[in-house]
Amino acid sequence: MKLQQLRVLLAVAQHGSIHEAARSLHTTQPALSKAIAELERELGVTLMSRSTRGVSLTPYGAALVKRASVVEQELRHALEDIEAIRGHDEARLDIGFTAVASNGPLPEAMAAFRQRFPNVALRAFEMRPQQMLEGLREGRLDLGLISTCSGPGSNVFQWEPLFSVAMHLSVRAGHPLRRVRKLRPLLDADWLVLDPVDDPFSPLVSTMRLHGLEMPRRMVQSASNLLGLQLATQTDLVSMWSDAVFHGAGPLRLSGDALERLPITDELPDFEVYLVYRSADLMTHVCTEFAKEARHHARINPPWRAPRGVRKAAD
């Protein structure tokens, strides 16, 4: 199995067409088809199904593509590390983050990193936690900043506590339920949900599980936090927001008293934000340096609390 064969396979999988894959690799269709045929012959399986609509991966092909993408990314990382040792800082760093993480020290960390490494192509993508874990697993992301109320996830990755943010149940100003102090009376209200209800990282799911309660029956879902904030302040939907909305900085920070925090006495879980990566040993030079910036700015930024474990140790 040759690296070029894997690159050909990845290109065909990405484009879904032999013709487009050949164009992207600056080669001919016969040469590309020959490489795929040789790879199939060596493995003894069919990797692709061909039809008038293009090509699609067989289960064998899908399994190989998943691993091949990691191989290609690791090779890119190796070459970037070699260039870093030579004194060149030209590289690429792909970071995933959740909305809560974006209201923390991430902007400051990115600004400081850019000053130190102006030639690094820094790309940041807002994602759901499960999307980030998939990106890390497949090598498409170098680092993730994942917020969760459920603690560290899969032990396939390293979960490093970065900072913590309190959560609040909220309603618009003047809402008839604004003085409710317990969760159970709110279950019959209309709710705004910003995360998929089957997402184990969701703060609402974590809260209801903590108190042994069923999920609210009437919910409006929004994948956009900015739209969600407008719905929360202009309708009667009950919503759950991090402390960043009330005391943070950035586009999700509220002005005035458009949103009231409910005086809930039931415990609400904190949003813990983690740096998540495959292995410290496999980090590229620029990824290691960015992680240092993220840790530094999380530590010195006063609105954010230390992770729960660090707070307990200090107490």
Image: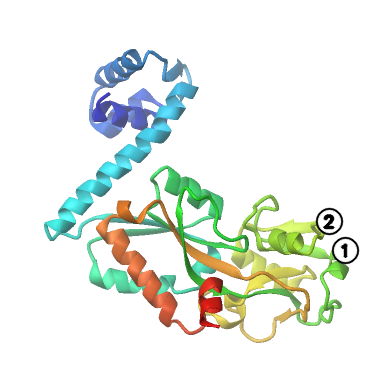
Disc with the residue nearer the chain's start (1 vs 2): 1
Give the distance between the C-alpha atoms of the residues marked 1 and 2, in whole angstroms: 7 Å
Instruction: Please give the name of the residue rendered at 60% of the width and 76% of the height, measured from the top-left corner.
Output: 245
For the C terminus, the quadrant is bottom right
In this view, the residue in front, 312 or 180, is 312
Residue at mark 2 = 217
Tell me how the rendering is colored.
rainbow
The mark found on residue 188 in the picture is: 1
- Is 117 above or below relative to 200? below
The answer to whether one can see residue 195 in this image is yes
Instruction: Please give the name of the residue rendered at 19% of the width and 60% of the height, measured from the top-left corner.
Output: 89
The answer to whether one can see residue 14 in this image is no
Q: Residue furthest bottom?
A: 256
Q: Is residue 170 left or right of residue 104?
A: right
Instruction: Please give the name of the residue rendered at 30% of the width and 44% of the height, measured from the top-left corner.
Output: 74
- Is 53 above or below relative to 25? above
In this view, the residue in front, 19 or 274, is 274
- Is 49 above or below relative to 165? above
